[in-house]
Amino acid sequence: MRRNILLILIAVAATLSCGRNNTPDAYGIVGFESYTVASSEAGQIVALDVTEGAVLEKDDVVGLIDTTRLSLQLNALVSQAAHLRNTLPNVGKQVDVLMRQKESLENEKSKVTVLVERGSASSKQLDRINDEISVLDSQIAALKSSLSRENSQILSSLSALEAQASIVRDQIAKSSIVNPENGVVTAKYVTIHEFIAPGQPIYRLADNTNAFVDAWFEGGILSTIKLGDNVTVKIDDGVNNMRSYTGRVTYIAENAEYTPTKVQTRDTRTTMVYHVRIELISDGYLKSGMPAEIYLDSIK
């Protein structure tokens, strides 16, 4: 009799133990990091190759905003800049005329100096030549200063035009809609031919490799986990079996909250829980919104 009672107690204990191990420590929802891809420029969408569920690669060009106005504006700026370059004064050429006159006077001065030393010429002739050379030096200095100021003003205007052209080129480049990361399109907000404004969402992209589970733990269990802990996450595979994943705890809320509506059951509507995020590596099976069961490795 005692032996039978002992066997019954062992069986009950084993049953309770199995039940504990098979009971999830928390429940959660699978999610993926997502990005809202927005327009950088205003205009009409003239091309858009985006469909919900499509898998996109990083740097894929998936659309284009009309650049007709920007292209015309750029052409006008380029033409203005070319015209300004043609008006840049040729300092060397304009000064060269006066320098040749000075060179001629310098040669004449040399000859007259010799004649003055011999007494064959008056010193007044030498003085006249020196005065003419002095006047030419003043003219050359004034011309160089004037041309320098003119050149500086033109170069300043040219620099402003080139800066405007660079801005327009950047706007044209940003009119191409470029996919920022690898991922799956989960929502599409606009269609071709629509007019959009800067910052307006075009589509939403989910990272299809790095998944996470947002789970909610009761306070009594929270003390058994910490950041960096590995946990077991199980997902229903649809054929009465569970797929198991190893996840890592990356976030634990500091404050409790009521169980979120999307995971409420009749027994947990008023339960205070703590939000915990668990990172997973997706194998292609995981989908956003899938329910998940979490088992703590630290609780056996």
Image: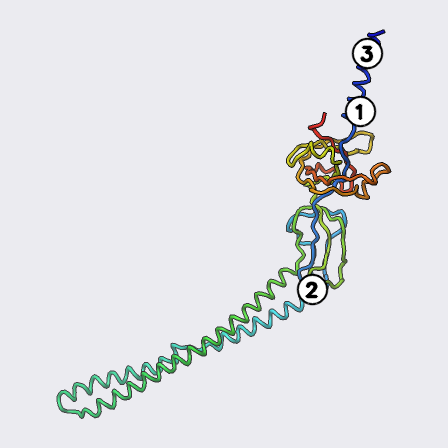
Would residue 174 be found to the left or right of residue 274 on screen? left
| Residue bearing the label numbered 1 | 19
| CB under 8 Å between discs 3 and 1 | no
Q: Could you classify mark 3 by the number of other residues whose Cα lies within 10 Å: few (under 14), some (14-19), or many (20 or more)?
A: few
Residue at the farthest right position: 266
| Residue bearing the label numbered 3 | 7
Assign the C terminus to one quadrant of the image. top right
| Residue bearing the label numbered 2 | 42
249, 13: nearer the viewer? 13
Would residue 8 be found to the left or right of residue 111 on screen? right
Calculate the distance from the C-alpha at mark 3 to the C-alpha at mark 1.
18 Å
| CB under 8 Å between discs 3 and 2 | no
Disc with the residue nearer the chain's start (3 vs 1): 3
Would residue 170 be found to the left or right of residue 27 on screen? left
Disc with the residue nearer the chain's start (3 vs 2): 3
Calculate the distance from the C-alpha at mark 1 to the C-alpha at mark 2.
60 Å
Location of residue 107 in the rendering, given as x and y in whole percent from the top left corner: 24, 83
Q: Secondary structure at mark 1?
A: helix
Name above or below for residue 109 compared with residue 166: below
Q: Secondary structure at mark 2?
A: loop
| Amino acid on which the number 2 mark rests in the picture | Ala
Location of residue 26 in the rendering, given as x and y in whole percent from the top left corner: 76, 34
Q: Quadrant of residue 117?
A: bottom left
Q: Secondary structure at mark 3?
A: helix
Location of residue 284 in the rendering, given as x and y in whole percent from the top left corner: 72, 38
- Residue at 76% of width from left, 51% of height from top? 187
Numbered tag placed on residue 81 in the rendering: none
Assign the N terminus to one quadrant of the image. top right
| Amino acid on which the number 3 mark rests in the picture | Leu
| Amino acid on which the number 1 mark rests in the picture | Gly
